[in-house]
Amino acid sequence: MAARQEQVRARALRGGRGAATYGSGFSSQRPVGAPKAPAKPRPAEPAKPDTSYRAYKEWCRQRGMPVSGGAPTEREYAAYRKWRDAQESARPSAPEPTEPKVSGEVSEEQRTAATITESEGFAIAALKTYAQAQEKLHERDRYGAGDEMYANPVKGRGFPDLRSVRGRALNLIEEAFAAATSPQKAWHGYYFVDITRFADGRPHKWTSTFGLCAVPAEYGRTGVRTFTIDWGGAVFAKDTGGKPVIRFPRASEGWRAP
């Protein structure tokens, strides 16, 4: 028994294969068949340059520069320090980890799509405001024609009259809305055109009917769809390629509710 213990102790001291930790009942070796633990990768670090005085002397000899064989003089030591500082400053630094691209970054296409969505929603709201303003104007004879008429381009300027009629302020719509009669004067990406004809091409008289068309000022950038509204408050939409319409739309022509 004593001989067996001596063998175990000797094997532990040698650290040989199958050696056991002396005084414990557990083997210090990995069990047979057990998978090895994966080694953790270490970031590669650049090699440190040799900046010793011996390396400096060798550097000088390779370039034919005189250097004393013994202890450096004060002048040589000053030159060595400059050389050492230059070597250490030229040492490549460890690469810094690159920041991953944030998935929440917005692309130009996404920004344009968001602008179009916002502008189209605003155009629909503007048309509904227009319809409400027309009903308020229709309550009184603003044109002095002896009958009640909606704001129209026959007796006046059209929908801008909802802002003022012949110098009389009404303020039923905003000033910027009333001025948005062309792409150059767009309001929130859209300009507006009076609808003057029925779907069959006949002109309407503005006494019981009205209509307005909202057109993207920059097709594909501030809007894609063109919108219309009629005297019943019905809004329709269609991609007309940025072209305005002056006739009330037909469903058979591809107009749909937005």
Image (cartoon, rainbow, N blue to C red):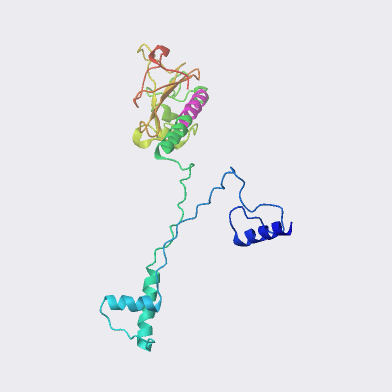
Q: Position of residue 126 (x, y in %)?
A: 48, 29
The image quarter containing residue 156 is top left
The image quarter containing residue 248 is top left
Q: Is residue 29 left or right of residue 221?
A: right
Q: Position of residue 255 (x, y in %)?
A: 42, 17
Residue 167 at least partly seen: no
Q: Position of residue 49 (x, y in %)?
A: 39, 69
Q: Nearer the viewer, residue 236 or 181?
A: 236
Q: Nearer the viewer, residue 168 or 12?
A: 12
Q: Residue furthest bottom?
A: 73
Q: Residue furthest right?
A: 1
Quarter of the image containing the N terminus?
bottom right
Q: Is residue 123 magenta?
A: yes
Q: Is residue 127 magenta?
A: yes
Q: Above or below — where is 118 with respect to 152?
A: below
- Residue at left offset 60%, top offset 44%: 32
- Residue at left offset 42%, top offset 27%: 159
Q: Nearer the viewer, residue 74 or 158?
A: 74
Q: Above or below — where is 96 with respect to 58?
A: above
Q: Above or below — where is 26 with respect to 254?
A: below
Q: Position of residue 97 (x, y in %)?
A: 46, 54
Magenta portion: prevailing SS class: helix
- Residue at left offset 38%, top offset 88%: 74
Provide the residue span drawn in magenta.
122-135
Residue 160 at least partly seen: yes
